[in-house]
Image: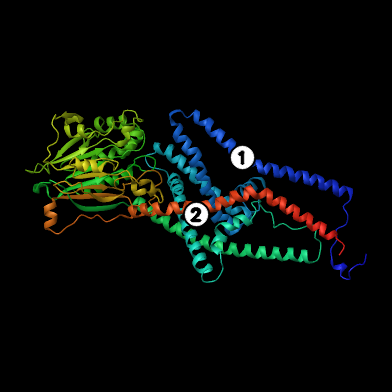
């Protein structure tokens, strides 16, 4: 057959030898086994994880439901969040799109010496995460045996809390970058689909294999195929370099936001504001107008709050010179032992003319309420102090025995006692509280008759629940805590369902005496890490006024929404949107995983076709 004059430019493949055929057969068999393993790997791993969780749940006993929620929701969510942080801090700025967290981590462990240029960012990331987890574990264990938390525990436990701040920083940067890609790159610069390409389409076009370069057709030795491959590799490398440069700019902005917001959160958690509000109280006698009631909640004496915090709170409350002091639950947050006795000792120094009153919260219930009752009612120095525990009881405030001034202060047990899961805890009982008056030496006097309906009533209830019913029952003002204002965003979304988040709220149930009010404190310290992102620690000085006096003076109660309340509504809107957006790349990953074998088969078929075409005599 005649040959074309340009035959020399066409690459041909010589017939394979017997050894090559044997090697190809072995390679094909090996590849087939890999494909089979990949197709069954995910179902097998899922089956093992589910089986292990189901087996462990049988040993959890009464805690089976919390365990299952933690195992099947909490752990996967934490893993996804850790991967999300790693993608933005390590992979995007320094690695290839094909690198995975598990692959780079395995490379750190198994490679000696490791490639620092590739693995050092991931090593730093894991070091930070592990230190934070260790700090939180130490804080919740040995922290309860320290009068003051150690510097290491404070640093690492707060670092654990700052992971949420870091996630918010990354999320904010992603949102801004997506907006830029959609509004500027797509609409103004004409780069159609730039936002979609960055957010999820690259997942479909990139492999998940660590360190694997773009596929190269090794059967093509020269000519246009080789030039095409080289050009594709160069274009790919150029695009990867541009993506990394852009990711490093975003990383710098993320770190600036993280440092700024963490510093802000630390200050908000360690420097409580003093709130001063005037509140109209229905049926308040003119003789009680101007009554000064200081309030604090959620000191959480325990792993992260020590004797210095208790001393600070006492000094601050006494310095306000109130007529009475109300401590509204969660003052103690560890089982009663000699350490917490020392930590809470400063509370015996609280002073007010009409007395110091305290109710319990869910953390006293969960840490042994019987121990707290005995400590604060019977043991020195509390037994000799002016501190009075009100648990479904009430006391009468008289403004230093001012004629005509009487206010019923009702202290309720916490709602957590209603579930019956805490030993010796009692449920809130309003009918009992208005009939039981606190007596001398911690005794309770059964008055038989309820508090007079002519008296103004103020209720101390740790959790801000049941306010509408309380207003219907004649309560003019309820004092609550518990919420911590959400403490660290986006935890604010968990506050949905409470009657109040923070600050003052009005409840008008049609009473002839006017509306009732709920005041929620965000707490002096809070639980866990001492950070406050979009919330603020506080104590409060509440001036009780008659509605008539406030109206005459042209004053209105401050019902403005707090930062924490605004953050809660923002979280309600933005979190579902964020979840939906995150489901898009996740579904793309599932689609890619399910189609990976078919794509590989198609690639193999394409390769064979190319080989056959090269054998054709042109």
Is 126 on the left-hand or right-hand side of 473?
right
From where the camera sits, is residue 568 visible? yes
Q: Residue at x 70, y 58 (%)?
A: 214
Can you give x and y, in whole percent of width and height, for residue 486 in the image?
36, 48
Q: Earlier in the sequence, mark 1 or mark 2?
A: 1
Quarter of image, res 471: top left
Can you give x and y, in whole percent of width and height, for residue 91 in the image?
59, 55
* Circle 2 residues within 10 Å: few <14, some 14–19, many ≥20: few
For residue 120, the mark is none
* Circle 1 residues within 10 Å: few <14, some 14–19, many ≥20: few
Quarter of image, res 390: top left
Instruction: Count the numbered circles shown.
Output: 2
Is 422 on the left-hand or right-hand side of 227?
left
User: Does residue 67 sit above or below 592 in this rendering?
Assistant: above
Label 2: which residue?
581
Q: Residue at x 57, y 37 (%)?
A: 49
Image quarter (top left, top right, bottom left or bottom right) of the C terminus: bottom right
From where the camera sits, is residue 130 visible? no
């Amino acid at each position: 057959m005649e040959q074309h004059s340009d035959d020399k430019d066409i690459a041909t493949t010589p017939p394979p030898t017997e050894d090559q055929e044997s090697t190809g057969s072995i390679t094909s068999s090996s590849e087939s086994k890999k494909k089979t393993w990949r197709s069954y790997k995910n179902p097998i791993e899922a089956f093992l994880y589910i089986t292990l969780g189901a087996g462990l749940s049988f040993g959890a006993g009464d805690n089976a439901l919390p365990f299952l929620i933690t195992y099947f929701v909490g752990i996967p969510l934490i893993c996804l969040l850790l991967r999300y942080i790693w993608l933005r801090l390590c992979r995007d700025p320094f690695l290839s799109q094909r690198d995975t967290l598990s692959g780079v981590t395995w490379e750190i462990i198994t490679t000696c010496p490791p490639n620092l240029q590739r693995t050092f960012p991931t090593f730093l990331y894991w070091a930070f995460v592990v230190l934070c987890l260790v700090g939180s574990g130490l804080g919740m264990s040995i922290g309860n045996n320290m009068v003051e938390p150690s510097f290491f525990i404070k640093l690492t436990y707060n670092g654990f809390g700052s992971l949420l701040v870091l996630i918010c920083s990354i999320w904010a940067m992603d949102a801004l970058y997506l907006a830029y890609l959609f509004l500027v790159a797509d609409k103004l610069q004409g780069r159609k689909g730039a936002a979609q390409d960055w957010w999820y389409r690259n997942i479909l076009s990139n492999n998940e294999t660590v360190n694997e370069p773009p596929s190269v057709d090794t059967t093509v030795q020269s000519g246009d195929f080789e030039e095409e491959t080289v050009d594709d590799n160069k274009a790919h490398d150029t695009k990867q370099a541009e993506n990394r440069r852009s990711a490093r700019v975003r990383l710098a902005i993320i770190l600036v936001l993280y440092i700024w917001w963490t510093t802000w959160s630390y200050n908000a958690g360690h420097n409580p504001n003093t709130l001063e509000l005037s509140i109209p109280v229905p049926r308040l006698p003119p003789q009680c107008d101007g009554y000064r009631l200081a309030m604090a909640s959620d000191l959480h004496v325990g792993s992260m709050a020590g004797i210095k915090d208790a001393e600070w709170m006492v000094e601050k409350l006494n310095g306000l010179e109130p007529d009475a002091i109300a401590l509204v639950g969660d003052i103690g947050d560890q089982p009663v032992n000699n350490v917490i006795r020392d930590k809470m000792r400063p509370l015996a120094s609280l002073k007010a003319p009409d007395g110091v009153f305290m109710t319990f919260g869910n953390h006293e219930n969960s840490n042994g309420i019987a121990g707290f009752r005995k400590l604060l009612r019977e043991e020195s120095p509390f037994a000799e102090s002016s501190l009075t525990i009100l648990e479904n009881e009430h006391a009468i405030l008289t403004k230093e025995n001012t004629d005509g001034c009487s206010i019923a202060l009702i202290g309720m047990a916490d709602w957590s006692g209603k579930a019956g899961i805490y030993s010796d805890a009692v449920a809130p009982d309003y009918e009992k509280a208005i009939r039981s008056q606190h007596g001398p030496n911690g005794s309770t006097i059964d008055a038989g008759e309820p508090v007079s309906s002519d008296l103004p009533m103020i209720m101390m209830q740790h959790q801000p629940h049941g306010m509408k019913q309380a207003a219907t029952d004649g309560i003019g003002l309820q004092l609550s805590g518990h919420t911590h204002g959400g403490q660290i965003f986006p935890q604010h979304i968990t506050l949905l369902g409470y009657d109040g988040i923070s600050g003052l709220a009005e409840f008008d149930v049609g009473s002839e005496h006017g509306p009732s009010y709920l005041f929620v404190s965000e707490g002096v310290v809070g639980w866990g890490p001492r950070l406050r992102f979009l919330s603020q620690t506080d104590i409060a000085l509440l001036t009780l006024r008659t509605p008539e006096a406030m109206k005459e003076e042209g004053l209105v109660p401050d019902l403005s929404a707090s930062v924490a309340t605004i953050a809660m509504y923002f979280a309600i809107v933005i979190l579902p949107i964020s979840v939906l957006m995150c489901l898009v790349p996740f579904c793309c990953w599932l689609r890619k995983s399910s189609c990976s074998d078919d794509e590989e088969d198609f690639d193999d078929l394409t390769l064979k076709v190319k080989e056959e075409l090269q054998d054709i005599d042109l």
